[in-house]
Amino acid sequence: MQYFSQGTGLIIWALLLLAGIIGTGLAFRFSSRREWTGQAMVPTVLMALGLLFFAITFDFPSEQVGPALIPRIWIVCLIAICLGLTYFTAIGKADKDPKAGRIGFVLLGIAVMVAYFIAMQTIGYFISSFIFLALIMYLLSWRKPLTLILVPAGWLLFSYLVFYKLLYIQLPLGFWENYL
Amino acid sequence: MDFFESLTLGFSVLLGWKPILIIIIGVIVGILAGAMPGLSPSTAVALLVPFSYTMSPTLALILLTSIYIASNYGGSITAVLINTPGTPSAAVTALDGYPLTKKGQAGKGLGTALVASTVGGAIGVAILILFAVPLAKVALKFSPADYFALALFGLATVASMGRGNTLKALAAILFGLMIKNIGIDPISGVSRFTFGSDQLYDGFTLIPALIGLFAVSVVFVKMESWTGAPRVMEKVDNKLPSLAEFMKIKMTILRSSVIGTVIGIFPGAGATIAAFISYDMAKKASKTPEEFGKGSLEGVAAAEGANSSSVGGALVPLLALGIPGSATDAVLLGAFMLHDLVPGPLLFQDNPDIVYGIFCSLILANIIMLLIGLYGNRFFIKVVSVPEAIMYPLILAIAVIGSFAVSGSLFDVAACIGFGVIGWIFKRYGFPVAPIVLGIVLGKMVEENFRRAVMMDGFTIFFTDKLAFIVLLISFLSFVWPLYKSWKHHKAKQG
């Protein structure tokens, strides 16, 4: 296990675990248990994460009550429970996956949040927040132009007064920092 | 310092306009947050923690605990008016509250909920003061083995949060515990699971993780089922229950308040379980059980008395032992840490002004909640009617700025978004997120005390230390019992 605890060994181990996750997903997706795919994937990913962390613990100093002891206890318990969950899922005793809602819409929301996070570092908090709020409101079907401007503007004023001026939080200004 | 001197000290903290204003703001924000479907008390407190950074620790905690206590009443507003509980525990209130609205007696439903919440809250605080102070004194003598056992007990009972799926709740706890292992080992100083990232040396910052799991995930969940249909509020009449009607339900309010407080003391039990048990007992004790579910004032009183009083109960283990009894308590623990305070017996010794200030502010918050609730329902209904297309983007904006404000780090914002996604996935597949938070919060306490106990006295300490042994035994039973129950349930279903 020591080989997999760092460097190339760890990368190989991570790739093997990734293959395991994909394999499990495919196995469920193309079997009679396809309606349980999501229910199986959550414990599988948790197990893979546990196994990755378990391998890393072999890089820690080996002591009887050392830094590896508690993580290993949690990981072993997590893997045991996830195995149980996967087993119940595989035999169809678990709840089926929930009906797919607007997952694409959620993913779009997550993508907008990530873009907002990146934009904050380049164009600064204030401009990116304005665009973010207006965009998310628009995505949530809000079409009144005045509100689409007033709500983000109101939030900016609030965050400027409360966080920037009152609480002295240095909000990221992006490239504007060079000009202010 | 004796008890009454301490209480006087607590009230002296509240002298002046600032603490009173903070309590009023906390109560209004708490009622509003509780009333908004999807925003639980824990979400509300997590979102408001960033606003308390520059306040003194006492004022910050007064604000957050006022929000906590008022949000439980707030949950009843939408439960009564639109059959959509603002908080999980208000689901029980809706059983009788909404039928009252259908009968055109919404005012009676809201009035009963308000009075029951106030009385319940007050009884909960009284029991909190009576229990927490002596418990903290006893806890001063606890050894690391005892603390380990108590923290483990807290985690084991949280398994009940799975609501029928103990394995998923346990997986969530262990995931939280595993996440807590990221960073520098508190005892040996070895860096663990940081993958060479400096930002992970202190592990994930608690508040951004909480905001992500509780607030951001809620928005993602809402987006998945987004229809854009506006909420329709019923018109509210102002007719409160008569004095005679209140007298009829006084015993129900008292009984449910005591039940709620006692259940609240047990980690993991929480307001929802308290409300269900209290409702069930009120129905059994009622002279008119057939009215339950059809608009019974007793039903509303039982649910609200119990869920509000559970706040006081849940604060007992948090303040006296440093063990959060509920998800909101875990967020409060994060707020304590943010102000460099550690809840537990030493807090009573070193910062009595803070502890007794919280006690006294909770008493005052209940009175203010009664006054605001009596005259402010129309206002709350107006605010809660804010379109979701405006409310949810604002929640995301608060989440982002709140996460950033903790330490001025964009890494925390990324962590908040990441935890939001994890929370959404967990909720989607029926994994509760509150146990993750409790795992993160209690992880350090469990590990440090376990290793200290073993290093000092060896593994046998858990058998020779009587308190630790008994608590561990109870923890084991509370861990195994839900598993046994679900196995039995499964067998019965098969049979």
Image: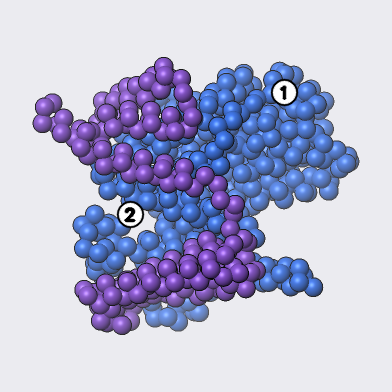
Q: Taking A48 as reference, is B415 above or below it? A: above
Residue under the image location 72 percent in, 23 percent down: B107
Q: Is residue B347 left or right of residue A177?
A: right
Q: Which quarter of the rendering shows the C terminus of chain B?
A: bottom right
Instruction: Check disc 1 and give the amino acid type.
Output: Gly
Q: Is residue B329 left or right of residue A132?
A: right
List x then y, in percent, for residue B129: 55, 44
Crowding around mark 2 (Cα neighbors within 10 Å: few <14, some 14 to 19, many 20+) is many
Q: What's the chain of the residue with tag 1?
A: B
List x then y, in percent, for residue B244: 82, 25
Do the residues at discs 1 and 2 belong to one chain? yes
Instruction: Check disc 2 and give the amino acid type.
Output: Phe
Residue under the image location 21 percent in, 63 percent down: B196
Crowding around mark 1 (Cα neighbors within 10 Å: few <14, some 14 to 19, many 20+) is many
- The chain coloured blue carries which letter? B
| Cβ–Cβ under 8 Å for marks 1 and 2 | no
Q: Colour of chain A?
A: purple
Q: Measure how far apart labels 1 and 2 are at the Cα level.
A: 46 Å
Frontmost residue, B207 versus B423: B423
The numbered mark at residue B204 is 2
Answer yes or no: is residue B231 visible. yes
Q: Which residue is mark 1?
A: B107
Q: What secondary structure is found at the residue carrying circle 2?
A: loop
Frontmost residue, B3 versus B455: B455
Residue B393, image quadrant = top left
Residue under the image location 35 percent in, 33 percent down: A132
